[in-house]
Image (cartoon, rainbow, N blue to C red):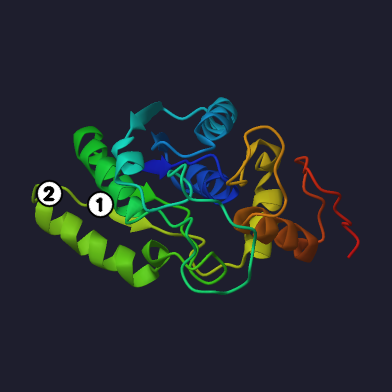
Amino acid sequence: MKGIVLVSGGMDSLVVAAIAQKECDEIYFLHLNYGQKTEVRELRAFQQMRGFFQPKDVLVVDVSYLKQIGGSSLTDRKLEIKDFAGDDGVPNSYVPFRNAHLVTIATSWAEVICANRIYIGAVEEDSSGYPDCRENFYKALEKAIDLGTKDETKIEICTPIIHKRKAEIIQIGDKFGAPLHFSWSCYRDNEIACGTCDSCVLRISAFKEAGLIDPIKYAIEIDWKN
């Protein structure tokens, strides 16, 4: 069994990489640079994860056209990354249809190396409300892949944490011995996590719920007991 893991450098993809390593005979890592504001830090996290998991091969792809398209505070310098404001619809950090780009690039690679699975760390139930993190989207995409590839190509899209809460994901990672300290979640900064953006707040809350202390540093003081 061969599996391609979409590794952003974030915590979810890190835990999924640990799961894939247990389920597959060979794993391959795919990372995308798409002009995000924390591109340098995410790439560093990816390289650290690569060193830890030792995948069979890696592919780092530049899709900076997503920055040119814009429409997201992660890529557009004119848009401010907002502090966490609770459940208020799709946040401006959503990169339009980004995950479809990830999966289709992985599909092209999978067909060449005869990989059976594509792993992605999408989370539907406890995420930021991104529409391309829904389970029904991946089921439909898997059908499209089957129609658009060779008859002998059979690729499964694996979303092992899609119905997990962030705290559960952290606990799985801790159980598997995943290097959580390598992961990077902050949308705003490349050196010290801001602690106030949407992604940071979800991560901090999840570590507290999981009963663990986040190993990365934050620009704000965190009371891990509350």
Q: Residues within 10 Å of mark 2 (few under 14, many from 20)?
A: some
Q: Which structural element holds mark 2?
A: loop
Who's the residue at 32% across and 43% down the image?
Answer: 66
Residue highlighted by disc 2: 149
Looking at the rendered structure, the secondary structure element under dot 1 is loop
181 above or below 170? above
Amino acid bearing label 2: Thr
Residue drawn at 71 percent across, 61 percent down:
206
- Mark 1 vs mark 2, CA separation in Å: 9 Å
Q: Which corner quadrant holds the C terminus? A: bottom right
**Residue 81: image x %, image y %?**
56, 52
Does residue 71 appear to the left or right of 108 in the view shown?
right
Q: Earlier in the sequence, mark 1 or mark 2?
A: 2
Residue 115 visible in the displayed image: no
Looking at the picture, tell me which residue is in the foreground, 21 or 102: 102
Q: Is residue 172 left or right of residue 153?
A: right
Q: Quadrant of residue 156?
A: bottom left
Query: Dividing the image into 4 quarters, which one contains the N terminus?
Result: top left
Residue 46 % position (x, y):
53, 32
Dot 1 alpha-carbon crowd within 10 angstroms: few under 14, some 14 to 19, many 20 or more: many
Which amino acid type corresponds to the residue marked 1 in the rendered image? Ile
Q: Residue sitting at 60 percent across and 48 percent down?
A: 11
Number of numbered labels in the structure image? 2
Eyeballing the image, is 3 above or below 84? above
Specify whether 51 is left or right of 129.
right
Vertical arrangement, residue 44 with respect to residue 1, above or below: above
Which residue is more in the foreground, 213 or 79? Answer: 79
Report x, y in % for residue 17: 51, 44
Residue 55 image point, x, y percent: 46, 30
Q: Quadrant of residue 183?
A: top right
Say which residue label 1 marks: 155
Query: Is the residue under label 2 in contact with that under label 1 (CB below 8 Å)?
Result: yes
